[in-house]
Amino acid sequence: MTIRSVLAGTGSYLPARVVTNQELAATVDTTDEWIVERTGIRERHIAAEGELTSDLAVRAAESALEAAGVKGEVLDLIIIATTTPDNTFPATATKVQARLGANRAMAFDVQAVCTGFVYALAIADNFIKVGQAKTALVIGAETLTRLVDWKDRTTCVLFGDGAGAVVLKAENNGNGASAGAIRNSPPKGILSTHLHSDGRHYDLLYVDGGPSSTQTTGQIRMDGRDVFRHAVNNLSSVLEEAMQANGVTAADIDWVVPHQANRRILDSTLRKLGLPEEKLVVTIDRHANTSAASIPLALDEAWRDGRIQPGQLILLEAMGGGLTWGAAVIRL
Ligand code: ACO
């Protein structure tokens, strides 16, 4: 038998305030038509004044713990993927830990920008597989609009705030992953994770501040066209790698739950792999790009509305600053 990380529950939280493209166009030199055509975004949620990343994370975590029937005090591990921690240190995860009463857990943050959730999931999965944790909470939480330069129309229209979370439980199930085995007697849980980064492209997408460089928080800077090109290439390549590692093809995949950066990136990536649009979980129109939060937000939505069903095979994928990118293959 093999120890696997099984998804026991999901949760999410979006701040109450919704800002439409039309509202943005009142203060930014842009239009609803431009934003929808180039990105697929129609609106985004923006955190209230004083509402912090930890507040969003706690709400998402509570809902995931409830769905999983797990109490905070049994958690061994809490990881928050975030680019927008409450403070430079300590980790926002420790604040969330205290509010969940998860006093046994080890808690830390992971920084891989938009790929953060896939990185955090892979780390938690590895902790579980080596037996160092039995119950883990993985959160993607962001108040990304606080890093936005509202005078830069090429970036400020793209982002939103939110949080999503999953509870993972260690379970003995299935034999080691082998190509045919996955199709014939499918094991449950995270089947594989695939992480990459290429620091040569650090300057394509970054924040122009930080404690060591400017002692300010800074704002998002991006070469959108180049990021777009790398996103389509890297995402299709990591998805192919993920399917190949499990001996499955596009026809075996029930759902792709991608990082929601741009509708055109999603469509181009899917086309390259021969995956139909109907298999894509899309939230970009309502959430915009919530960085590390976008995958667990989309996953929670599709799980709760019944699209995603037990036994199905799902692919997660993301790319973000660094550049970083990755994928995960999960049998529910
Ligand atoms: N409203 C109106 N016009 C705009 C806006 C705006 N908000 N932003 C840019 N424009 C104008 C530009 O000034 C330019 O005008 P010009 O031709 O007169 O110079 C024109 O629109 C075209 O600009 P491009 O930058 O070439 O537009 P493009 O089609 O590349 O779309 C976009 C820009 C949406 C940013 C796209 O490049 C993109 O999505 N890139 C990926 C970036 C991304 O998703 N980053 C998120 C983080 S990384 C990740 O999550 C994968």
Image (tube, rainbow, N blue to C red):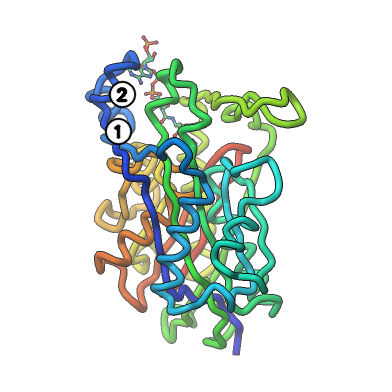
Q: Position of residue 294 (x, y in %)?
A: 43, 49
Of the pair 186 and 93, the residue shown nearer to us:
93
Looking at the rendered structure, the secondary structure element under dot 2 is helix
Residue 194 visible in this rendered orientation of the protein: no
Q: In the drawing, what numbered circle is on residue 24?
A: 2
Mark 1 and mark 2 in contact? Answer it, CB < 8 Å: yes
User: Which comes before the other along the chain, label 1 or label 2?
Assistant: 1
Of the pair 141 and 192, the residue shown nearer to us:
141
Position of residue 262 in the picture relative to residue 199 (left or right): left
Q: Position of residue 119 (x, y in %)?
A: 60, 55
Q: Residue furthest top?
A: 29
The residue carrying pointer 2 sits among few (fewer than 14), some (14 to 19) or many (20 or more) residues within 10 Å by Cα, namely: some
Residue found 51% across the figure and 53% down from its top: 140
The residue carrying pointer 1 sits among few (fewer than 14), some (14 to 19) or many (20 or more) residues within 10 Å by Cα, namely: some
132 up-or-down from 12: above or below: below
What's under tag 2, amino acid-wise?
Answer: Leu
What's under tag 1, amino acid-wise?
Answer: Val
Residue found 57% across the figure and 58% down from its top: 96
24 up-or-down from 98: above or below: above
Quarter location, residue 154? top left
Q: Position of residue 55 (x, y in %)?
A: 49, 51
**Image quarter (top left, top right, bottom left or bottom right) of the C terminus:** bottom left
Q: Position of residue 247 (x, y in %)?
A: 49, 70
Residue at image mark 1: 19
Residue found 45% across the figure and 52% down from its top: 163
Q: CA distance from mark 1 to mark 2?
A: 7 Å
Q: In the drawing, what numbered circle is on residue 186?
A: none
- Is the CB of the residue bearing disc 1 within 8 angstroms of ligand 1? no
329 up-or-down from 292: above or below: below
Whereabouts is ligand 1, in terms of quadrant?
top left
Residue 296 visible in this rendered orientation of the protein: yes
